[in-house]
Image (cartoon, helix red, strand yellow):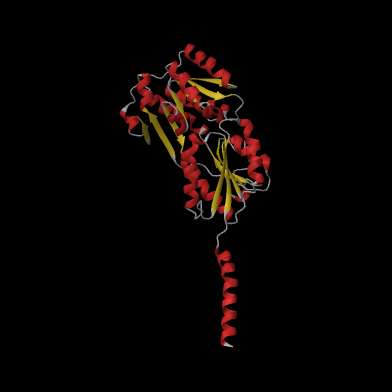
Amino acid sequence: MRRIGLAVVLALGLTLAPLAAEAQAPKVYRIGFLALQPFTDLAPYVAALRQGLREHAYVEGQNLVIESRFADGNYDRLPSFAAELVGMKVDVVVTLSTEAALAAKKATASIPIVFTQVSDPIASGVVASLARPGGNLSGFSLIAVELTGKRLELFKEAIPSLKLSIIFCHRGSPVNALALKEAEVAAHKLGLEARLVEVRDADELEPAFTTIARERAHGVVLVPSSFLVTHGFRITELATRKRLPVLGWTDLQARKGALMSYGPSASDVLRRAGGHVAKILNGAKPGDLPVEQPTKFELIINLKTAKGLGLTIPQSVLLRADQIIE
């Protein structure tokens, strides 16, 4: 009996061991990441998303897989990439840019979507309400447009001789009117003139800067749009050739040669997006999660660009910078 009993125990042990191991294995979630820009531009933001997920116990290689798709500035690739991620049956899609959010929204009405870097989620048609987005979307608005006036103030502090500033934007963007209004209010207080210049496509960039230089503008303020990020190097190249300082809204533009940037920290937003994703994986419905706003803002100054333009940034402005590129 002892031998039979021992055999039974051993047999049961061998049978139950793999079942126990299987029961203890953590569920592996799949996150889709869809972005308009190339990975080389967005590497710090992807790292921030991973950090945010880690802070909520979702770790790549343990219980998480991230499937990334970067359109390299090609808008036409976004729909197919979005469909590809949906076909992989990812648990959540994280998007970066308004265009990426809209492509993901069109691709699925069931898989949760967490969007980031959307200037105006309502005007662009991403969601109908910020408080209760509804459906399968939630995320973070950019609110950089509302800071156009503040950026113009910083521009004037950095360049005291500034008299005429061009508000440069992509034609058709729903935020242009608000950006110009913000700039005009600030310009009036500062004794400046602000004019709007719009471009439809990349072919209009060079003629636009020729016109801006002819009007003897003293600086260019970029209005938030994916188009101006995509063509960031070309814009700063043209501006530098005309000896025009450029003020952007994201660190990416300062890294691409703009004199300054001031706006929400994209890295901080992507880190917080990791928390949004965690809430959804833990059972929250995206449509019940209010759209959040940035809470951290950064002033970045490119001294290399300043030197090339022959500008000396006042010490009072340099002391306020969160980052200085030399």
Q: Position of residue 41 (x, y in %)?
A: 49, 34
Q: Is residue 62 above or below residue 14?
A: above
Hey, which residue is sitting farthest front in the picture? 3
Quadrant of the drawing holding the N terminus: bottom right
- Residue 47 lies, in percent from the top left, at 47, 43
Check the image and report above or below for 3 versus 146.
below
Taking the spot 43% from the left edge, 30% from the top edge, the residue there is 255
Visible residue check, residue 128: no
Q: Going by the image, does 298 lie left or right of 87?
A: left
Looking at this view, name the residue that lies furthest to the bottom: 1
| Residue at image coords 59%, 22% | 201
- The part of the image, by quadrant, that contains residue 24 is bottom right
Residue 217: % across, % down: 46, 16
Q: Quadrant of residue 297?
A: top left
Up/down of 227 relative to 267, above or below? above
Quadrant location, the C terminus: top left
Residue farthest top in this picture: 214
Q: How many marks?
A: 0
Foreground pick, 53 / 70: 70
For this rendering, which residue is in front, 200 or 144? 200
Residue 307: quadrant of the picture: top left
What residue is drawn where x is 66% and y is 41%? Answer: 83
